[in-house]
């Protein structure tokens, strides 16, 4: 769960529904961050496959394109991808 989800979504719901725990609210609203490398690898592969020309540019030194791939991974995962793990997976795939 990201800090943003905690401060902007969970805490306000806890105030409205004080009988529910934070974990109950997170589960009910499907706000659990995806950190399973298998699932994340699939998102990474899809993101990289979508932009073959950008992969070439990245490999030729345009490392700022990492943000493009990460944006696509986050979109595919509906914002649930753990950014640290996803970034490492994207880098690993692009540097093959």
Image (tube, grey):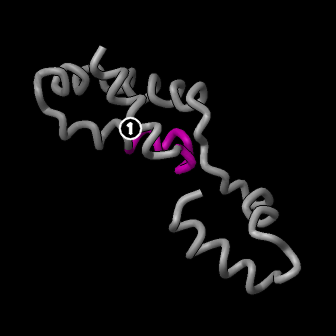
Assess whether residue 76 is covered by the magenta stretch: yes
- Residue at 58%, 39% (x, y): give it: 35
Assess whether residue 10 is covered by the magenta stretch: no
Residue 90, picture quadrant: top left
Q: At which x and y percent is residue 38?
A: 59, 25
Q: At which x and y percent is residue 76?
A: 52, 39
| Disc 1 residue crowd, few under 14, some 14–19, many 20+, Cα 10 Å | some
The quarter in which the C terminus is drawn is top left
Given the current orientation, which residue lies at the most extreme bottom position? 15
- Residue at 80%, 60% (x, y): give it: 28
- Residue at 25%, 23% (x, y): give it: 55
Q: Which residue is mark 1?
A: 87
The correct choice, above or below, for 91 with respect to 78 in the image is: above
The correct choice, above or below, for 6 with respect to 78 in the image is: below
- The count of marks equals 1
Q: Which residues are magenta?
A: 71-81
Given the current orientation, which residue lies at the most extreme right position? 19
- Residue at 77%, 62% (x, y): give it: 23
Q: Nearer the viewer, residue 20 or 75?
A: 20
The answer to whether residue 33 is left or right of residue 86 is right
């Amino acid at each position: 769960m990201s800090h943003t989800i905690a401060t902007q979504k969970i805490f306000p719901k806890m105030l409205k529904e004080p009988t529910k725990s934070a974990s109950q609210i997170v589960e009910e609203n499907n706000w659990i961050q995806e950190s399973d490398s298998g699932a994340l690898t699939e998102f990474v592969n899809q993101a990289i496959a979508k932009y073959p020309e950008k992969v070439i540019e990245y490999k030729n030194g345009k490392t700022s394109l990492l943000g493009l791939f990460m944006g696509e991974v986050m979109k595919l995962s509906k914002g649930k991808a753990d950014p640290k793990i996803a970034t490492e997976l994207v880098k690993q795939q692009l540097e093959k």
